[in-house]
């Protein structure tokens, strides 16, 4: 019989997911070493991605914080930034290429929410052709939003930079299928090239399976040129702690690419 786990005091008890399936899922999420650059500030709000921005015409940026250095850097390169968040009145710093909508992104339209499709429609009207970048930090809504996002708009995204929340819930049978479905969908068309644990994370462990609750994932569309790199160092030399006052959280070993050299000449 599967062991039950308690989420929090006063909450429901949920059955634990099959640990072999959890290990198998994580094995598909080990980044493929690729040459990366840092986009945005040399602090919280910056992200690592392949240097493949030429020709990107728009950035979809749901989730607006008090720091927008990433968006500013892209805007200065001539990329239009489409922002959405109902928890703020606008971006902390204005820019003529910022287009802000006071809505949460959800799988439904409402007074304070809109679907990913409706949000992306605005970028499509402004840029009917050309690739996009998606940078998403929407506090846990990413799971349901990514599963419901239209394929036609995900396919236009050259890069996906997504902060996934509540990753430790993959141990719960009721959440495993949702998370596995989201990652399977993304990996069909994108290669995972980087993971950075947010050092505010709680870390959950069952045996050898260690999972930080919040991690930033960078995906690169599979039809784009792949620039291989040597086996990665953990953390990456360009990674920066999300909270400087807290200890660095290194990507747990079970998530790491095998430590081997990749031959650059093929």
Image (tube, grey):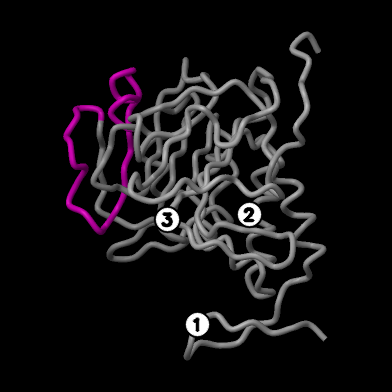
Q: Is residue 78 magenta?
A: yes
Residue 8 numbered tag:
1
Q: Which residue is mark 2?
A: 182
Q: Is residue 154 magenta?
A: no
Q: Give the class, few, some or many, for how many residues have Cα within 10 Å of label 2's Cα (few <14, many ≥20).
A: some
How far apart, in angstroms, are the residues tagged by discs 2 and 3?
23 Å
Q: Is label 2 in a helix, a strand or a loop? A: helix
The quadrant in which the C terminus is found is top right
Q: Answer with left or right where residue 136 lies relative to residue 256.
A: left
Q: Quadrant of residue 187?
A: top right
Q: Position of residue 253 (x, y in %)?
A: 69, 47
Q: Is residue 250 above or below residue 260?
A: below
Q: Nearer the viewer, mark 2 or mark 3?
A: 3
Q: Give the class, few, some or many, for how many residues have Cα within 10 Å of label 1's Cα (few <14, many ≥20).
A: few
The quadrant in which the N terminus is found is bottom right
Q: Answer with left or right where residue 110 lies relative to residue 19.
A: left
Q: Nearer the viewer, residue 54 or 47?
A: 47
Q: Nearer the viewer, residue 195 or 72?
A: 195
How far apart, in angstroms, are the residues tagged by discs 1 and 2?
25 Å
Q: Position of residue 120 (x, y in %)?
A: 42, 42
**Looking at the image, which residue sits at the far top?**
265
Q: Which residues are magenta?
A: 71-97
Q: Are marks 2 and 3 in contact (CB under 8 Å)?
A: no
Residue 200 numbered tag:
3
Residue at image coords 60%, 87%: 13
Q: Is label 3 in a helix, a strand or a loop? A: loop
Q: Position of residue 160 (x, y in %)?
A: 52, 37
**Chain-order first, disc 1 or disc 3:** 1
Q: Is label 1 in a helix, a strand or a loop? A: loop
């Amino acid at each position: 019989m599967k062991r039950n786990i308690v989420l929090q005091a006063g909450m429901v008890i949920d059955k634990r997911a099959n640990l072999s399936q959890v290990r198998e899922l994580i094995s598909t999420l080990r980044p493929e070493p690729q040459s990366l650059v840092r986009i945005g500030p040399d602090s919280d709000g910056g992200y690592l991605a392949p240097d493949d921005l030429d020709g990107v015409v728009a950035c979809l940026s749901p989730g607006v914080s008090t720091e927008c250095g990433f968006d500013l850097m892209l805007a200065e390169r001539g990329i239009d930034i489409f922002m959405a968040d109902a928890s703020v009145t606008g971006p902390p710093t204005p820019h003529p290429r910022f287009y802000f909508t006071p809505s949460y992104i959800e799988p439904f339209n409402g007074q304070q929410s809109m679907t990913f499709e409706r949000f992306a429609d605005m970028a499509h009207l402004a840029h009917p052709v050309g690739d996009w970048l998606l940078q998403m930090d929407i506090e846990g809504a990413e799971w349901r939003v990514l599963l419901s996002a239209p394929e036609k708009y995900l396919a236009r995204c050259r890069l996906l930079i997504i902060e996934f929340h509540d990753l430790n819930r993959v141990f719960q049978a009721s959440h495993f299928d949702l998370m596995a479905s989201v990652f399977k969908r993304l990996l069909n068309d994108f290669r995972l090239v980087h993971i950075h644990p947010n050092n505010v994370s709680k870390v959950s462990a069952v045996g050898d399976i260690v999972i930080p609750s919040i991690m930033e994932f960078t995906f690169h569309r599979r039809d784009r040129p792949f620039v291989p790199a040597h086996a990665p160092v953990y953390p990456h030399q360009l990674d920066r702690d999300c909270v400087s006052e807290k200890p660095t959280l290194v990507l747990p070993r079970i998530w790491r690419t095998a430590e081997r050299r990749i031959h650059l000449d093929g």
